[in-house]
């Protein structure tokens, strides 16, 4: 790869720059999302639909611990982007060193706690009945690899902050390809069942960590840290914490959402209903990959130019990112509205002579998934404004509005809706909560963003 420096973030045309940042990010997220999707298809076909539900139960716990790394990464990367934009390289180096130290300390403690409370956490997140045993197997093995995943997620955001999206893309592709390869070997060839699925995922984390370590030790990275940079600095930790808390709060609310959804749906329809949500959850990760890619590409551009006081470029990047993200979100919406049944059937085994219980589960899932998918994704075309708006405040270091807007959809609207509507509308109330929350959150974000552009960015001169 050709040598690239962060200076390009402040010089190239915004449209071209956003494509250069967003396309690799989208490809990386696509491969990661495909990994989750194909992994679920493999598990559903080679182990069974209950196994998909078991993985869905484990994800919020392991993802929350891994999200600590992402929170530290995004919080610190906002500082790194602005420091590089202001030509303050020493602060960028010190921030990166603190990110590494903090990620290791926090995730190791959380993994220890997660293993200690394993028998309490799994049922709490919906791992009941026949789901518990496979969920415990998967959870225990996955947790050993989570610190490496956290370091990968932290390091990946720093690579983007340096303005090197292609390397970040490769870092996202490696664990996905590795996981799918190990899935085939461990599940299909060795017939290790849930053990195989868990070890395949953990092996992918280790591969990713190896690549990111190589990147920062090689000449490709501008951030060459020494031992002195690992010492924790209170002012940097406070800034990382205030900005990273936005990401952590979002993942915490996501984990609470999984807890509530799995338990509400289990009460409404048992393990089969949890399997329906597991498929919907996979599509929420996969289908929106280009929108998330545009958001990831937008972050370093906005942060760097804000740090360089190029407010005209910041404003242009907001408009361009919303336009691109809205376009791809609409395309995703059309596909999901037209082919929901075909998508759901991909996750279910078509082996002959399936046990009666699994046949009944598969029939239930096929009957309930299409309507659920259409309702969950009904407001997809408008979510670009919501995602880019919240990302802007995080990119420029404004922690409070970033936190509030990040929590708006799931925390302020979605959770109250899923606690209320199912009491009157049953299963339909669960699925309707998604588009209602999207519409309300987008309206709130739009008001905040328009006010910010008019009062903070318009009329300011670099």
Image (cartoon, rainbow, N blue to C red):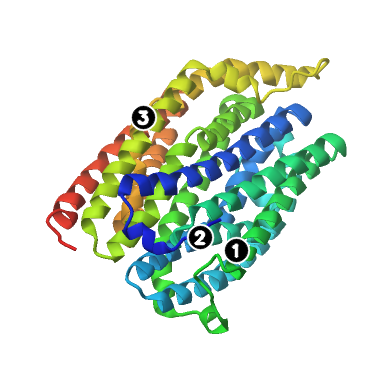
Q: Is residue 197 left or right of residue 423?
A: right
Upstream in the sequence, badge 2 or badge 3? Answer: 2
| Tag 2–tag 1 contact (CB < 8 Å) | yes
Image mark for residue 159: 2
Is residue 261 visible in this depiction of the protein? yes
Q: Secondary structure at mark 2?
A: helix
Query: Closest to the observer: 227 or 405?
Result: 227
Toward which corner of the image does residue 179 lie, by quadrant? top right
| Residue in view at x 52 percent, y 74 percent | 97
Please identify the residue farthest to the bottom as the structure is shown: 228
Q: Which residue is label 1 attached to? A: 215
Q: Which residue is label 3 attached to? A: 381
| Tag 2–tag 3 contact (CB < 8 Å) | no
Q: Count neighbours of disc 3 (C-alpha within 10 A) and say few if under 14, some if 14 to 19, many if 20 or more.
A: some
Q: Which mark is nearer the camera, 2 or 3?
A: 2
| Residue in view at x 60 percent, y 33 percent | 278
Is residue 129 visible in this depiction of the protein? no
| Residue in view at x 42 percent, y 49 percent | 297
* Image coordinates for residue 363, horizontal then vertical, percent: 66, 15
Q: Count neighbours of disc 1 (C-alpha within 10 A) and say few if under 14, some if 14 to 19, many if 20 or more.
A: some
Q: Count neighbours of disc 2 (C-alpha within 10 A) and say few if under 14, some if 14 to 19, many if 20 or more.
A: many
Q: Secondary structure at mark 1?
A: helix
Upstream in the sequence, badge 3 or badge 1? Answer: 1
* Image coordinates for residue 322, horizontal then vertical, percent: 31, 40
| Tag 3–tag 1 contact (CB < 8 Å) | no
Relative to 18, does residue 267 appear above or below in the rendering?
A: above
């Amino acid at each position: 790869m050709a040598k690239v420096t962060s200076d390009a973030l402040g010089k190239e045309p915004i449209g071209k720059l956003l494509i250069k940042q967003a396309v690799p990010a989208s490809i990386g997220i696509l491969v990661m999302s495909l990994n989750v999707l194909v992994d679920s298809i493999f598990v559903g076909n080679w182990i069974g639909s209950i196994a998909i539900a078991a993985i869905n139960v484990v994800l919020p716990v392991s993802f929350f611990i891994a999200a600590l790394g992402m929170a530290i990464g995004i919080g610190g990367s906002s500082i790194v982007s602005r420091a590089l934009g202001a030509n303050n390289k020493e602060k960028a180096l010190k921030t990166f060193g603190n990110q590494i130290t903090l990620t290791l300390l926090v995730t190791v403690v959380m993994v220890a706690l997660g293993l200690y409370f394993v028998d309490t956490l799994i049922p709490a997140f919906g791992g009941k009945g026949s789901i518990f045993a496979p969920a415990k197997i998967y959870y225990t093995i996955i947790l050993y690899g989570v610190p490496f995943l956290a370091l990968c997620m932290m390091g990946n955001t720093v690579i983007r902050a340096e303005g090197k999206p292609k390397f970040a893309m490769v870092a996202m592709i490696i664990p996905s390809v590795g996981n799918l390869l190990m899935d085939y070997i461990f599940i299909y060839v060795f017939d290790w069942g849930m053990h195989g699925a868990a070890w395949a995922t953990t092996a992918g984390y280790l591969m990713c960590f190896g690549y990111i370590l190589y990147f920062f030790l090689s000449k490709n990275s501008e951030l060459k840290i020494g031992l002195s940079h690992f010492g924790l600095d209170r002012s940097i930790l406070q800034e990382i914490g205030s900005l990273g808390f936005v990401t952590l709060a979002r993942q915490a609310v996501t984990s609470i959402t999984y807890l509530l959804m799995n338990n509400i749906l289990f009460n409404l329809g048992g393990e089969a209903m949890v399997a329906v949500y597991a498929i919907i959850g996979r599509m929420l990760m996969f289908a929106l990959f280009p929108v998330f890619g545009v958001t990831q590409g937008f972050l370093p551009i906005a942060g760097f130019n804000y740090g360089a006081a190029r407010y005209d470029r910041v404003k242009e990047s907001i408009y361009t990112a919303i336009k691109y993200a809205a376009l791809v979100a609409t395309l995703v919406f059309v596909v999901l509205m037209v082919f929901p049944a075909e998508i759901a059937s991909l996750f279910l085994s078509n082996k002959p002579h399936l046990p009666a219980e699994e046949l009944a589960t598969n029939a239930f899932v096929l009957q309930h998934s299409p309507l659920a998918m259409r309702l969950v994704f009904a407001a997809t075309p408008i979510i670009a404004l919501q995602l880019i708006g919240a990302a802007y405040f995080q990119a420029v270091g404004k922690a409070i509005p970033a936190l509030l807007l990040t929590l708006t959809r799931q925390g302020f609207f979605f959770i109250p809706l899923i606690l209320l509507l199912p009491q009157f509308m049953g299963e339909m109330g669960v699925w309707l909560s998604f588009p209602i929350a999207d519409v309300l959150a987008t309206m709130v974000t739009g008001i905040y963003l328009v006010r910010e552009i008019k009062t903070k960015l318009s009329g300011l001169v670099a």
